[in-house]
Amino acid sequence: MNPHRILPEDRFSTLRLGDARVHTVRHRPVINPAHGTVFASVPRADPEHLERAVTAARDAFLGWRALSWAERQTRIEALADRMARARDELADLMTLEQGKPRHSAAIGEVDYAVGWLRGIAGQRLSGRILEDAPHHHVEQSYAPLGVVGLIVPWNFPLCLAVWKLAPALMTGNSVILKPSPYTPLTALRLAELAEDILPPGVLSVLTGDDALGQWMVDHPGIAKISFTGSAATGRKVMAGAAAHLKRVTLELGGNDPAIVLPDADLDACVPQLFWGAFGNSGQWCVGIKRLYVHDDIYPQLLDALVTYARSVPMGDGMEPANLLGPLQNARQYAKVLDILDDCPRRGLRFAHGGKRLLDQAGYFVPVTLVDNPPDASRVVVEEAFGPVLPVLRYRDFDDVVRRANDTEYGLGASIWGRDTAFAQTLADRLEAGTVWINEVYVHGVDFPFGGHKLSGLGVEHGAEGLAAYVNLKIRMTAR
Ligand code: NAD
């Protein structure tokens, strides 16, 4: 595939509903964020399409749940193999629709998703015997929920979809996946790749507007919604799900603190801190969004970050030299610029960046380091979800823990220092679902991941992540 080619008009013009290919009356444009131009269009599903997808998923459920774990594993591994063979094509689509550099799309999304499918397929959710007395036998097992709705955002379109669909499918559910309206193409391609591997109706991908997500939440035929996105939308999902007492898993926003201790190895941690904050152009739920640096090392660390930032080229992700891409969409671009513009109005100093990139088409915001803004400033309080990082001074450890916890979010946090025993004592005091020490955003199929406070409800990954897609069932026999 020529990476600069505009997709043919009709490349993704239909939805697969059960065993039929269906044309929709309406379509949505897909914009390349590096240029701000339309390069493809996709079907815009109506309630009628959702209805057909739910019917197909319910029909497929009985056969799918009846398969053994090993049979489902074979299919999911076959899907992983198929995706691995389509690596280049998926990575091209990813960069065109999401904006991230092509090598990050290949390694960080496609390879990662392939490995994740295989990893989850290798897990087991085993029942157990709770009592085995001569007169009484009690056994705990699990039953899939039925049709599960998966709703994902635009920052990691493939990874976040696979985080949900791998455990949902392995536990015997059929699924309807709704990608973000901004990044529908890789999900549609995934559905095509799965077509002759998964029985019709087991996996449907529906593209459309935000309203489609709400219709899924409101649909009585969908037993659970697993949602990743903003806390504002998460609230709507939970409120809508309440009408049917529908199960929900919510992976929401974050405002993750990183605390750099005075004994930190700066040479080792500066690149990690940089990529922890600015990787994917800051559009990372567990990205470092507030960087607290001890007074003793503040000037050196800020200088080192500025020097590092100067060495990282930003531009169209299809150009191999570029290590950072644009923001993904116009709405996000406007939001981040608004936070950026607020800084000089409040007299804040940029240690790096800060100026709008007027000579670039597309949604580019420069890597920006804000020098010790007040705790109450917008750039500290709000989740920018872009390449803008407040660097904050602290002296006292109790005080920095208090400041780090002073947020309505609680997704992740990180601590950087040579004395890992001391770092662990601080970690225990941080209100976050995951605290990393001398690393950041490491995930694994066996490590449950979820947020405290406004960052979410429930977890993904690990045994708890599988258990989120089943009902627990107890069988008791008097004998
Ligand atoms: P968003 O909430 O606007 O949209 C997320 C998804 O929800 C999209 O598919 C959207 O179409 C859909 N949606 C919109 N309105 C809906 C409704 N009323 N009912 C059901 N679905 C609806 O979020 P976004 O802007 O796409 O993503 C950015 C946010 O996602 C950030 O806050 C980020 O921190 C968060 N995020 C969290 C994680 C995590 O794992 N915790 C991962 C990535 C992103």
Image: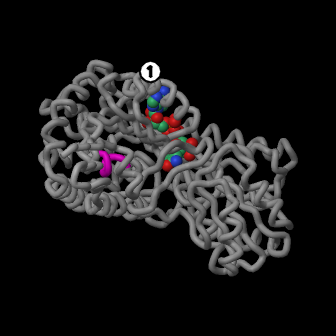
Q: Which residue is mark 1?
A: 243
* Magenta-drawn stretch contains 165: yes
- Residue 175: x percent and y percent? 28, 38
Per the image, label 1 sits on a secondary structure element best described as loop
Q: Is residue 191 above or below residue 311?
A: above
Residue at image coords 27%, 41%: 144
Magenta: main secondary structure equals: helix
- Is residue 76 shown left or right of residue 272? left
- Can residue 160 be seen in this snapshot? yes
**Residue lying farthest front?**
135
- Is residue 98 shown left or right of residue 62? right
Q: Is residue 83 above or below residue 28?
A: below
* Three-letter amino acid code of the residue under disc 1: Ala
Q: Nearer the viewer, residue 124 or 363?
A: 124
* Magenta-drawn stretch contains 307: no
Q: Count residues near mark 1 (Cα–Cα under 10 Å), then give few for <14, some for 14-19, many for 20+.
A: few
Indicate if the residue with disc 1 has its beta carbon within 8 Å of ligand 1.
no
Residue at image coords 18%, 52%: 72
Question: For residue 434, which quarter of the picture?
Answer: bottom right
User: What segment is highlighted magenta in the picture?
Assistant: 164-168
Q: Is residue 232 above or below residue 320?
A: above
Residue at image coords 71%, 66%: 426
Q: Quadrant of the N terminus?
A: bottom left
- Residue 133: x percent and y percent? 26, 55
Colouring scheme applied when the structure was drawn:
one colour
